[in-house]
């Protein structure tokens, strides 16, 4: 309990600005819309807001392709709107965390436009350029420099006519990877971060930060069924910790910030370094093990496999126990890259949606780490019943699903069901504010379809209702604020093999908390540890306390002793 930090006791609320609140009727969320809704987030009790990118961008990947780090995306408003939002947030006691996307820029960024010009110029070495593996053949480029695949499908290399070389893009062709080995690139990034911190922002969520240091010589990787290697090799790059330490000493250590690194593919030992308790790198990271337990070995996330609870628990328990004493954890079920939690891990039927959304909240918010709530999760928003593939905007799911169909890895007739279950757009449908037209999100035509269930699931109703998912989340957040046991207690997993029950005990200096969650629609027997039999229930998602040894469908409760 030494060295307590404010961000260990915080709850972070993630806003996907495009889908949060439109203020000018163009169908796209914006900064003025966010400012208007800040009191809603304060009411929920979250104290930090993570804003998905709001910088200038041609929107190939909805803002994760940045063309100017110090300008605001036109559709979202102006820098004055940003300053006003920041000021209002601070007045309400809410901190603002920016999304720092510096593994790559947009190909429309000024640096890239210069970099692709032939001949040496100050930007030539800002990106990762390579000649074709076997040179040019009859005026045409030979093979790609290595077999790496892009996260959005296909090769991770694109030949650029203007440059006469290939450039690396681990994401879309419009997201060239920056060359972090170039000290000038690091200088640029660090001074841009300083500029935002001087403006008063409170920290950064760092997009795919685990990928910034590429392996020496860019060797081929083990090819997957798609014919391309994944980028695992980049996730443990040779200079990663060196660069993060440099960032820390040159920028972060000078401010009181909250930092979280998005770290796909990170092994535990690495994570312990990233988020080490001495604070020499970042405060915490997002790992992905529990986000991928159901992935199909052949098609990855865009398949139809089902989650098994023992595997999901093993993934979560591993991080809860593995970071203990070394590093701080972050807790999430949902974000803009994942399907809706209640549809994926709970049950979104009329009968069980609310109860299972509350169960998921209980399970996550009483663990050790900083919890993240993704917009609409606090309402139990669900996946969208897409009518056709044309409704999908998300570049990742569109590319991957169509390439998997072409390769015969998935059946065309399954494509829509795959999108309904897995597309990132499930999380990106506009926020459901009320039951009026377009869910109160916009007076214009929404950029992405609104989930038709907004007449039943919306903030206006839930803020008023005492038994709503919103009210329950509010209670969970409040409980954490009052309890060192919830923030700092050790985590001990129970019943790891149960296919229905997720249970654990938190322990701090003799005080104990038992958390029991039923992930199934069946009543399940559970052997409650003796010491908790006379325990006090601090929260539960069924009104009455029945027999604790028979846990009802999607029931969750927490007992202290
Ligand atoms: C992770 C972000 O969360 C995701 O939305 C984006 O597509 C990729 N990084 C590329 O920036």
Image (tube, rainbow, N blue to C red):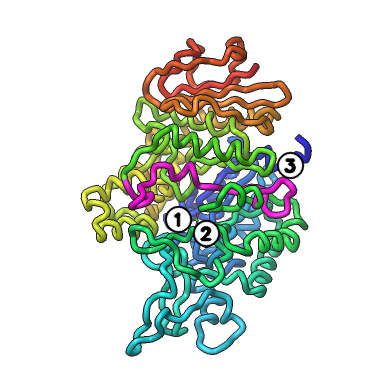
Q: Let me know if residue 268 is in the magenta part.
A: no
> Which one is nearer the viewer's eye here, 429 or 138?
138
Q: Residue at x 50, y 15 (%)?
A: 527
Q: Residue at x 38, y 86 (%)?
A: 136
Q: Which residues are magenta?
A: 274-303
Disc 2 and disc 3: Cα gap in Å? Answer: 33 Å
Numbered badge on residue 308: none
Residue 19 position within the rendered picture, expressed as x and y whole percent measured from the top left: 46, 50
Where 557 sits versus 454, above or below? above
Residue at label 2? 76
Identify the secondary structure beneath mark 3. Answer: loop
Residue at label 1? 28
Identify the secondary structure beneath mark 2. Answer: helix
User: Dot 1, how many residues are within 10 Å of its Cα: few (below 14), some (14-19), or many (20+)?
Assistant: many
- Which badge, 3 or 1, comes first in the chain's sequence? 3
Q: Quadrant of residue 506?
A: top right
Marks 2 and 1: CB-CB under 8 Å? yes
Residue at label 3? 5
Q: Let me know if residue 292 is in the magenta part.
A: yes
Residue 289 position within the rendered picture, expressed as x and y whole percent measured from the top left: 49, 44
> Which one is nearer the viewer's eye here, 34 or 180?
180
Residue 77 seen: no
Disc 3 and disc 1: Cα gap in Å? Answer: 36 Å
Residue 204 seen: yes
């Amino acid at each position: 309990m030494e060295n307590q930090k404010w961000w260990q006791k915080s709850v972070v609320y993630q806003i996907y600005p495009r889908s949060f609140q439109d203020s000018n009727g163009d169908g796209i969320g914006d900064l003025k819309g966010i400012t208007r809704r800040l009191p809603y987030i304060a009411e929920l009790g979250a104290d930090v807001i993570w804003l998905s990118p709001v910088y200038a961008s041609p929107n190939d990947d909805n803002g994760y392709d940045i063309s100017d780090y110090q300008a605001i995306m036109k559709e979202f408003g102006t820098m004055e709107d940003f300053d006003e939002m920041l000021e209002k947030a601070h007045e309400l006691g809410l901190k603002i965390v920016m999304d720092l996307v510096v593994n790559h820029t947009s190909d429309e960024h000024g640096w890239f436009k210069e970099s692709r010009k032939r001949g040496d110029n100050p930007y030539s070495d800002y990106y990762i350029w390579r000649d074709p593996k076997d040179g040019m053949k009859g005026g045409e480029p030979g093979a790609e420099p290595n077999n790496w695949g892009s996260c959005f499908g296909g090769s991770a290399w694109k030949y650029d006519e203007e440059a006469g070389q290939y450039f690396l893009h681990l994401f879309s062709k419009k997201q060239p990877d920056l060359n972090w080995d170039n000290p000038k690139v690091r200088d640029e990034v660090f001074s841009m971060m300083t500029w935002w911190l001087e403006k008063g922002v409170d920290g950064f969520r760092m997009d795919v930060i685990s990928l910034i240091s590429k392996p020496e010589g860019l060797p081929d990787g083990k090819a997957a069924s798609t014919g391309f290697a994944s980028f695992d090799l980049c996730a443990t790059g040779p200079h990663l910790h060196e660069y993060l330490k440099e960032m820390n000493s040159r920028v972060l250590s000078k401010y009181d910030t909250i930092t979280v690194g998005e770290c796909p593919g990170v092994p535990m030992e690495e994570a312990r370094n990233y988020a080490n308790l001495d604070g020499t790198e970042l405060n915490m990271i997002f790992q992905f093990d529990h986000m991928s337990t159901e992935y199909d070995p052949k098609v990855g996330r865009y398949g139809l496999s089902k989650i098994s609870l023992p595997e999901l628990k093993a993934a979560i328990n591993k991080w809860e126990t593995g970071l203990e004493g070394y590093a701080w954890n972050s807790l999430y079920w949902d974000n803009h890259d994942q399907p809706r939690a209640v549809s994926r891990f709970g049950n979104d039927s009329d009968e069980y949606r609310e109860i299972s959304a509350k169960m998921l909240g209980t399970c996550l918010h009483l663990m050790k780490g900083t919890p993240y709530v993704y917009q609409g999760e606090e309402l139990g928003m669900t996946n969208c019943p897409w009518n056709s593939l044309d409704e999908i905007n998300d570049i990742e799911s569109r590319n991957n699903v169509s390439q998997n169909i072409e390769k015969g890895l998935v059946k065309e007739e399954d494509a829509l069901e795959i999108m309904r279950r897995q597309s990132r757009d499930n999380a990106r449908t506009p926020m459901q504010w009320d039951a009026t037209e377009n869910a109160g999100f916009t007076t214009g035509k929404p950029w992405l379809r609104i989930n038709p269930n907004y007449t039943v699931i919306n903030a206006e109703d839930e803020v008023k209702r005492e038994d709503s998912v919103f009210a329950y989340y509010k209670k969970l957040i409040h409980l954490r604020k009052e309890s060192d046991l919830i923030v700092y207690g050790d985590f001990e997993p129970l019943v790891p093999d149960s296919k229905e029950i997720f249970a654990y005990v938190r322990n701090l200096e003799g005080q104990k908390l038992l958390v029991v969650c039923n992930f199934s629609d069946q009543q399940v027997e559970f052997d409650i540890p003796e010491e908790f039999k006379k325990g006090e229930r601090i929260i539960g998602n069924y009104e009455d306390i029945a027999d604790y040894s028979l846990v009802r469908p999607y029931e969750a409760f927490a007992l202290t002793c």
